[in-house]
Amino acid sequence: MDPFDAALDLLRRLPPSSTQQNLNGIIALRPDLEEDLLSSVDVALTSKRCTKTGRDYLCCDYNRDDSSYRSPWSNEFEPPIEAEAAADLIPGGRIRRMEESLNAGVDVYRELYYEGGVSSAYLWALEEGFAGVVLFKKTSSAGGSAGKGGWDSIHVLEVSEAAGKRSAHYKLTSTVILDLGLSSSAVDNLELAGNLTRQTESDLALTHSGSRESDIEQSHVVNIGRMVEDMETRMRNLLQEVYFGKAKDVVGDLRSIQPLSEVGRERDAHRDVISKMGR
């Protein structure tokens, strides 16, 4: 079996809450798989503080160069990287202008929907069109170490503009990493963790008026923001059904609120009615 496929298969079978630790262990054993694994495995996001602006930003494989990460606020790598490498990795022109507008938009969205947390957006040019990633992270705790909660959402997008730039094709791949835990004498240790990935594609119009290029840039920001917002709403609803709904069903099957004798009588009565209807 291919070592890379074996590593992915192993990570899928291990607890989702320990993905980062297990990933580090696999990389320590097989350093040659580091780049492929880091670009393929979704782990909880980490944050750093921009030394130039004092604002927090999120770190991922898309703004990383070795051990340096680019801040979306200053557009600089920390620690600094070589000038030749920076020229290829630091966006400029329309890509940087759209990145700045997108960061301003997702920052407002984060505050309204998450009431805290950290958000970041990164864009880079492709041969045809551009690509990017929008990141959100929110953690909370209740009663110190008694309870914890973490939400990480990663939205990777690819945009290709049609001839004449009157419309664009957007491809969005979104992953949500959820990690909830509770430790108390009543429940001992309870943990609910996992991730969910969904993909969508859409062709959306680009508006033109006045300054044509700036209008197109703004249209891209609006379209991306709307797609990310819609996808997050869908995935929140899915998580509600998949994780919490399933957990509720399992707990309901394991624990009976009614006395078992009463449940047995109801089951017998139901079976009796069914048998009489079949006669």
Image (tube, rainbow, N blue to C red):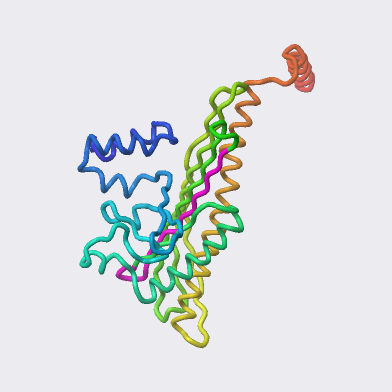
User: Which residue: 53% across, 69% down?
Assistant: 222
Of residue 278 and residue 30, the one placed in the foreground of this image is 30
Q: Quadrant of the C terminus?
A: top right
Of residue 207 and residue 46, the one placed in the foreground of this image is 46
Q: In the orientation shown, which residue stands out farthest toward the bottom? A: 210
User: Would you say 141 lies left or right of 5 here?
Assistant: right
Residues shaded magenta:
125-141
Q: Quadrant of the N terminus?
A: top left
User: Would you say 150 lies left or right of 20 here?
Assistant: right
- Residue 137 colored in magenta in the image: yes
Position of 134 relative to 138 (above/below): below
What is the x, y in percent for residue 172?
Answer: 45, 58
- The chief SS type of the magenta part is strand
Of residue 250 and residue 147, the one placed in the foreground of this image is 147
User: Which residue: 39% across, 45% down?
Assistant: 42
What is the x, y in percent for residue 25?
Answer: 29, 34
> How many marks can you see?
0
